[in-house]
Image (cartoon, rainbow, N blue to C red):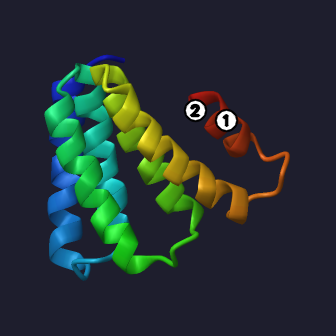
Amino acid sequence: MGNYSKALEFYEKSHQIFEKALPPNHPNLATSDNNIGLVYDNMGNYSKALEFYEKALKILEKALPPNHPDLATSYNNIGLVYHNMGDYSKALEFYEKSHKIFEKALPPRYPDLALSYNNI
């Protein structure tokens, strides 16, 4: 709906509850960081978006196996921010990391794999 301040308010409340209730490397914290990053990305605040996407990635790298699709999604999200910033070489670096995981983890006709090719 474009009401980013309201979205941030509720995502931050949610995140505070997760921080109190969950261990520091729980995937739900990564999802929460990712959601906050998405809002900042939509607002055009790319440095804040990267900050939260990178926090999510660090959690997922500890919590998940190296070829988990959620890691690929996290790399892709970071790539999208770099793309939005016009840093296409950095975006490509993250898109390719994402794509390598998707190729290993997903069936050949899976839609996320097609999106990965499209981003590259």
> What residue is pinned by disc 2?
120
Q: Residues within 10 Å of mark 2 (few under 14, many from 20)?
A: some
In the rendered structure, the answer to whether residue 78 lies left or right of residue 117 reads left
> What residue is pinned by disc 1?
117
Expressed as whole percent of the image width and height from the top left, the position of residue 100 reads 61, 56
Confirm or deny contact between disc 2 and disc 1 (CB under 8 A): yes
Name the residue at the bottom extreme: 23
What element does badge 1 sit on?
A: helix
Check the picture and name the quadrant holding the C terminus: top right
Depth check: give the residue in front, 20 or 51.
51
Q: Residues within 10 Å of mark 1 (few under 14, many from 20)?
A: few
Check the picture and name the quadrant holding the N terminus: top left
Q: Is residue 21 above or below residue 15?
A: below
Residue under the point 51% across and 60% down: 70
Which corner quadrant of the image does residue 24 belong to?
Answer: bottom left
Depth check: give the residue in front, 8 or 103.
103
Q: Is residue 90 above or below residue 75?
A: above
In the rendered structure, the answer to whether residue 12 lies left or right of residue 42 reads left
Depth check: give the residue in front, 118 or 68.
118
Residue under the point 58% across and 60% down: 69
Residue under the point 33% across and 45% down: 35
Q: Is residue 57 above or below residue 59?
A: above
